[in-house]
Amino acid sequence: MARRSPNRQRIDAVFAQVMRLPQLRPHAGAPRRLDALFDELGQPRPAREPDDIEELIQAIWIDHDDRRACASMAAATQAIMAGERDLALPILDRLIDDHPDWAEAWNKRATLAFLDKRDDASVDDIARALALEPRHFGAVSGFAQICLRRGYLQEARAAFQMALRINPHLQGVGEIVEALGQSLERPH
């Protein structure tokens, strides 16, 4: 049997983690108000617009009791959006050092690594974000994008399906799952 590369082993490990997400509970420090928002988001027709619920969830994820940490997160996010990713990385590194239980700090650094095409670093940070917040549909979708970029179509499809299980209202993801399913059904 051929030995898998460390890169593939990393993907396989996080894929197994993603497939176990429904059984996992968020880190003990996760705000409880997220539970009601995720319950509402999971409804086929929630009372509020799904985009509004997503924004509330993301606002909770990006918030922190430490106001300096919030300011640093805002600075890192702004740097990423401005294309100044080299400025964002040390800020995110420091946030993770100071607040290792903050899932969104790990997710933001994973996003930065993804943008820089440092997939292994991104996968490692996604794993940590999901260990802290297994409902992080953004992290799951990011992992699916990495699988897609690497040509792991079955894993990408399954991860996108898991993201939809967490948030059935993700824009465009259903279409990606369908297209991947059709691609996988075609003989090569």
Image (tube, rainbow, N blue to C red):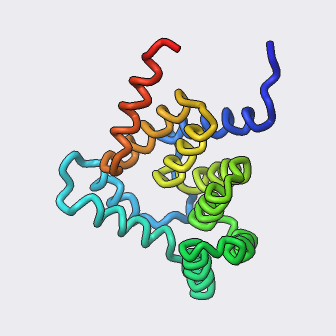
Which image quadrant for residue 178?
A: top left
Q: Position of residue 164 (x, y in %)?
A: 38, 43
Q: Quadrant of the N terminus?
A: top right
Which image quadrant for residue 146?
A: top right
Q: Position of residue 81 (x, y in %)?
A: 54, 73
Q: How many marks?
A: 0
Q: Position of residue 155 (x, y in %)?
A: 55, 31
Residue depicted at x 35% and y 55%: 38
Viewer-proximal residue among 47 and 147: 147
Residue at the outermost front position = 188
- Along the horizontal axis of the image, is 48 left or right of 58? left
Which image quadrant for residue 79?
A: bottom right
Residue depicted at x 63% and y 58%: 110
Q: Position of residue 160 (x, y in %)?
A: 45, 40
Residue depicted at x 56% and y 75%: 77
Task: Tell me: residue 69, above or below residue 156.
Answer: below
Task: Tell me: residue 107, above or below residue 19.
Answer: below
- Along the horizontal axis of the image, is 157 left or right of 9? left
Residue depicted at x 40% and y 46%: 166
Task: Tell me: residue 164, above or below residue 73.
Answer: above
Viewer-proximal residue among 136 and 2: 2
Viewer-proximal residue among 144 and 48: 144
